[in-house]
Image (cartoon, rainbow, N blue to C red):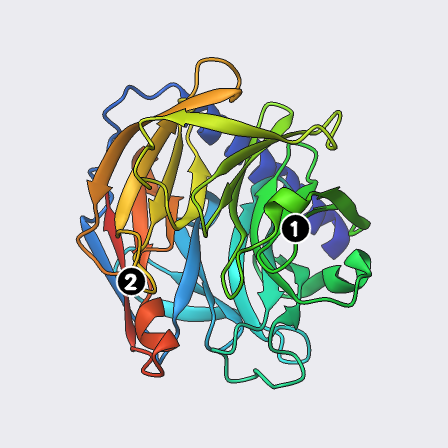
Amino acid sequence: MSHRQNHSLRRTLVATTAAVLLGAVGALPAAANTGCAPAVITGHAASLVPESAAWDQAHHRFLVGSLRHGTVSTVRTDGSVHTLVDDPGTLLEVAGLRVDAARDRVLVTNLDNGIGERSSAATNGRIAGIGAYDLETGRRLFYVDLAAVAGDGGPHLANDIAIGPDGTAYITDSFAPIVYRVGADGTASVLARDDRFTPQPGGYGLNGIVYRSGRLIVGKWDDGALWQIPLHHPADVQRIEVAGAEGGALLHLDGMLGRPDGSIAGTTNAFFGAGRDAEVELRSDDHWRTARLVAVRPSADPTPTAVTAGPGGSLYQLSGGLSDALGGHPTDTFTLRRL
């Protein structure tokens, strides 16, 4: 068997295994089997500042992106950290990160928020890109300059990613009122451009994004608004009325994750004297035309930015030290805490 055939077979086996595991997770009762999921995972890596995390089921490990170094690292359940992706000619800072198990790759957003070692005055607030990297070797498969796709010459910051069943990626831009669409082959376009997505002056706009049965659910960080974008007619953007979110309960809504039971888990954080550090749970009975906030759980760690699946159907929240990094004092530890 040739190397190419062997690699193809491996991809097929990974995809099949992932599908079986996803089916099993979807069939789990409300209480997941978390016996193999540590209560707290503390990672140690010099000023890594991870903003996002994803569970790589095939390799039984987490992946985290680094705002400080512009890298992607693996994190084992014992807290050991190893670099998987280091692409210094391309990646400045990594925020959003999703595992595409069916295609044996990880997708990451590239940006410059002024935190990274590779940040510069010329690129700060001007970078929006997405890269695809081999899940085993970290080799770059493709990279797309989304700011060039936007074509407006304005500020840009690629933030989070959702992946559809066909491998299409959808990416939010926190500095421009845009959601991008990138096909499995790297072909990119603007999916939706809507003035209602415009960030408040000096703030961040669109952030977390989740794919749900032919539609995207998108959160806006600066005001906590939730939006729905139907993929069959993306111009028909609709705001989702959220019961129980009165009084700014979703203010600073950051990373979001679609759960097997149809709910969406997310984080809110306290920045700039507003918001609160918490994990939130959202549900809908009408295909996300409306929603309800069913749980708000205060975070045990400061400034959480993401939630991720974990072993045994568990759910983890990431606290990567973003507040310290923004203050000029990046830390050497980060926490993944089981919820």
| Res 270 seen here | yes
**Furthest residue toward top:** 286
Tell which of 172 and 276 is nearer to you: 276
Tag 2's secondary structure? Answer: loop
Tag 1's secondary structure? Answer: loop
Residue under label 2: 273
The amino acid sitting under disc 1 is: Pro
Give the residue at x 43% y 43%. 224
Tell which of 76 and 45 is nearer to you: 45
**Number of the label disc, if any, that sits on residue 108:** none
Q: Is residue 60 above or below residue 118?
A: above
Residue under label 1: 177
Mark 1 surroundings: few (<14), some (14-19) or many (≥20) residues within 10 A: some
Give the residue at x 53% y 20%. 289
The amino acid sitting under disc 2 is: Gly
Residue 194 percent location from the top left of the image: 69, 43
Give the residue at x 61% y 72%. 125
Residue 233 percent location from the top left of the image: 75, 26
Q: Quadrant of residue 123?
A: bottom right
Give the residue at x 55% y 34%. 227
Q: Quadrant of residue 147?
A: bottom right
